[in-house]
Structures are given as C-alpha cells and as structure tokens.
C-alpha cells in the first residue's frame, strides 16, 4: 500500500483528491490537514464523503512521513515551505501555481511576486499525464497544471504539433467552483447563478503555461533515456567504451553536439536540454583501431546527422572518410537531391551489392524534418536488430532494449527495412 497525505484538504481540490484516493485499491489515505478544522471530521467539510471515511483533519505540525504528499495550498505556500515538506515525503505533488513555470522571471511577471525557491523550478515535472505520463511516473516532484491551461493544451497540442495552427484565441466557460471556495461578491449565488461573465480576457495566469507545451519545440527531456543508454552500453556484450557522442536540436532548431573520448558511462554530463530530437552513439572501434574523438559519431554536414552500428566486410565503394561509418554517410549524401529517403534507398542498394558480406548495417540519418532509419543484418538479431518503443509521445529507437525492459516492450524493425519518421509527427 502507498501511504498518502493531503496538505490543505478543506478546499475543492483537496476534497476531490480525497474522493478519488478513497477508491484507489493501493492507497492508504493517512492524513488530511486543515488548520481551520483541526480535529473535525473530514465529512463536516465534504458531506459527499459521509459513510466513506472516518478521517479527521490534522494540523500541518502533526504530519508524519508518507510515501506521497499532495499540496493543495494557496499560491506561495509550497515554494516557501518546500524543504519542510520534502522531509515528510519523498514524492510531492503540488497543485498550486508555484512550480508550473520553469522560469523565475516569467513567474514574477505573471504572479506579481518574487519566487522564493528559484533553484527548484526546473526540478518539477509538469503534471499532464496525457503528455508526461512516463516522466510523472518516475518523478519525485510534480506540479499540477492549471485547469484552463490543461483544457487548452490538450485541445490544441495536436494542431500545433502538425503545424496546422500557430496561434489561437481560446474561450473557456468555467463553473463557479473554478475560483475555489473562498467567498466573495462575485461568488455569491444571487450574483453568480445564471450569469456568464468575462474574467481576465487578457493576462490570465494560465496563459503562461500554454506556450511551454504548445509553442516550445523543446518538449522532450532526453536525460532519462540517456541514463538507460549508459547502462545498456556499459553492460553490452561487445565493448562500447571507445568514446561516445550525441547530437540534438536546440531550442532555436540548430544542431548541437557533444563528444567525449571516455565511455558514455564515465562522462559526468547530465544536463542535456529538452529537444525534439536526440541521437546518441557509443563507439566500439573495429579491432580497437582509430580510437580518437574525431572518429566518434554523430557525423554531420550541418544539415544532416548520422550514427551507425554494424560491420561490413569487403566493401568496394569509393567514398571519403576516416572510418567506414563516415564513408557510408558521405556516400549516401552523394544521392541527396532533396529527397533523403530516396538517397538512402539508392545508396544502400549499391553498398549491399558491392559488399562481400554485411554482418549488419544499421544507421540513423536525421535532418531537421525527419529521421531515416535503416536496419539490415545477416546474423545475431538479438544484438543487431533495431527496435522501437513509444514512451508517451516520444519514439525511442535503439539496437537493444533498455535495461529492465522485456522483449514485448519493444517492437522489432523488420530486416532490410527503411523507416522515414517525420519529426512533426513524433519526437525521437
């Protein structure tokens, strides 16, 4: 059982979480706090829960450690007391707006108050499970998304991702509960009932959240998958420690690269920025020759990026390059006349005909528009066959399954297959 406590359980959001968790078969609702109703039954504030719980409200000072803690408090409380709550639970889910934005200046602009916990802004995962389900599942810190932001993002994201929409005007019809249970003249029943009123038609705080998942092309965090890649490379049955490299599209849509002569598992860097495309390659030098950082992939011509895994014997194709993989990359480029998929198809056909034996030829050739994946092997499919896995709306491609995954978690790419994956349809 997972022990869960709710801090600030007398409001609408707290009451709804109580209702949902009471039905969860693997949750033990441990404590619910309310400074105003300490010692009073939870059902006094939430009569819809009568005969479903005998819990009474606790004070925050009486909280004990739990597995998961929900913070249902007014804006400003979570960022002021985050360290305190962290001592009480290893996983926090904050429903306020304190950590929805990852930029302190933007927060101060929209909330008109300084952020008192700037250093933790980027540690929170934005809590829309339809988009960030896998990141949420592994996160210690999650921020709930704004209600209007959630409705808008889920409705418009497919259109933005397809390039069908670049801007939009959104009209939200919200019920009276959206403003919380604090009484005001505007929430008074005779004033509110049967009325439709405009509320903040411009400058609504939730607008600040929307570009993060609509306009921002840097929607994928590559670091969790890269950590899996490190483990896979370290434990591979063929040594993958002759250096490594990676390439990704930055927020401006430009290629950025990192190469290191050390094995990927010894490289301390762990701060790769979000992106729509990330390629990594750990090198196993043929016969331990040519171990130099300039031979580490990805290779690039500033338009396309190339990584390769395999072995070709007796190749009779003339092409420039320091090592075989670079020669294959340059040979494919010869056929590029504006259709990279066709260039790959033509080049591969010639290379395979002019090679005495293809043990395996697997590669990814990426442009800013698409990733072209070719997989061919004549032995050892357990090691050479390329695989794909859908992680949320991100597509992972690798020559081996990630550590801990079973065979059914990944889909094998057919032998001699060429896939062209448009980036507007997926992140990779």
Image (cartoon, grey):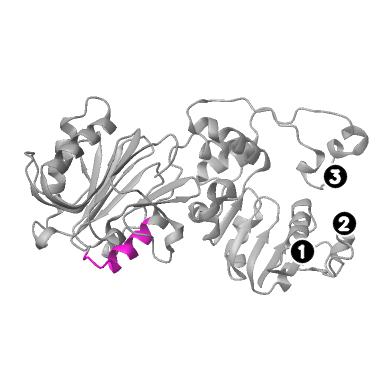
Q: Which residue is drawn at 30% across and 49% down?
A: 415
Q: Name the residue under label 2.
A: 48
What secondary structure is found at the residue carrying circle 2? Answer: helix
Q: Nearer the viewer, residue 77 or 265?
A: 265
Of the two numbered discs 1 and 3 on the same chain, state the one appearing first in sequence: 1
Instruction: Give the crowd class for mark 2: few <14, some 14-19, many >=20 residues within 10 Å.
Output: few
Q: Which mark is residue 183?
A: 3
Of the two numbered discs 1 and 2 on the same chain, state the one appearing first in sequence: 1
Residue 380: name its quadrant.
bottom left
Residue 205 horizontal/vertical position (percent):
63, 38
Residue lying farthest right?
190
Measured Cα–Cα span from mark 1 to mark 3 = 28 Å
What secondary structure is found at the residue carrying circle 3? Answer: loop
Question: Could you tell me which quadrant the C terminus lies in?
Answer: top left
Of the two numbered discs 2 and 3 on the same chain, state the one appearing first in sequence: 2
Residue 425: name its quadrant.
top left
Q: Is residue 69 magenta?
A: no
Q: Name the residue under label 1.
A: 22
């Amino acid at each position: 059982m997972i022990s869960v406590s709710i801090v600030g359980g007398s409001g609408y959001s707290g009451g709804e979480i109580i209702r949902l968790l009471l039905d969860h078969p693997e949750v033990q609702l441990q404590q619910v706090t309310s400074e105003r109703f300490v010692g009073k039954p939870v059902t006094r504030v939430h009569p819809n829960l009568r005969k479903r719980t005998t819990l009474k409200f606790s004070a925050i000072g009486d909280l004990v450690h739990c597995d998961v803690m929900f913070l249902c408090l007014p804006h400003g409380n979570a960022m002021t007391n985050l360290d305190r709550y962290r001592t009480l639970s290893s996983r926090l889910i904050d429903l306020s707006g304190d950590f929805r934005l990852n930029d302190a200046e933007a927060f101060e602009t929209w909330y008109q108050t300084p952020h008192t916990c700037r250093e933790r802004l980027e540690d929170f995962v934005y809590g829309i499970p339809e988009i960030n389900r896998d990141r949420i599942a592994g996160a210690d810190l999650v921020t709930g998304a704004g209600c209007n932001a959630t409705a808008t993002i889920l409705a418009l994201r497919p259109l933005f991702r397809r390039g069908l929409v670049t801007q939009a005007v959104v009209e939200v019809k919200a019920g009276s509960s959206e403003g919380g249970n604090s009484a005001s003249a505007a929430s008074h029943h005779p004033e509110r009932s049967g009325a439709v009123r405009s509320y903040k038609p411009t400058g609504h705080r939730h607008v600040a959240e929307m570009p993060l998942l609509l306009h921002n092309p840097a929607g994928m965090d590559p670091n969790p998958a890269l950590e899996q890649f490190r483990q896979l490379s370290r434990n591979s049955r063929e040594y993958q420690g002759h250096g490594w490299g990676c390439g990704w599209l930055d927020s401006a849509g430009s290629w950025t690269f990192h190469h290191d002569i050390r094995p990927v598992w010894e490289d301390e860097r762990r701060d790769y920025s979000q992106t729509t495309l990330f390629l990594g390659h750990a090198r196993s030098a043929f016969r331990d020759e040519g171990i130099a950082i300039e031979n580490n992939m990805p290779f690039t011509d500033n338009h396309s990026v190339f990584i390769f895994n395999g072995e070709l014997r007796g190749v009779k194709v003339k092409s420039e390059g320091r090592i075989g993989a670079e020669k294959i990359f340059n040979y494919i480029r010869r056929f590029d006349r504006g259709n990279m998929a066709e260039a790959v198809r033509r080049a591969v056909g010639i290379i395979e005909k002019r090679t005495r034996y293809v043990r395996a030829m697997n590669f990814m050739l990426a442009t800013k528009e698409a990733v072209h994946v070719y997989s061919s092997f004549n032995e050892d499919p357990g090691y050479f066959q390329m695989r794909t896995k859908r992680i949320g709306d991100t597509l992972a491609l690798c020559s081996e399954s990630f550590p801990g995954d079973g065979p059914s978690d990944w889909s094998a790419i057919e032998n001699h297959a060429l896939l062209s994956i448009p980036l507007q349809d997926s992140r990779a």
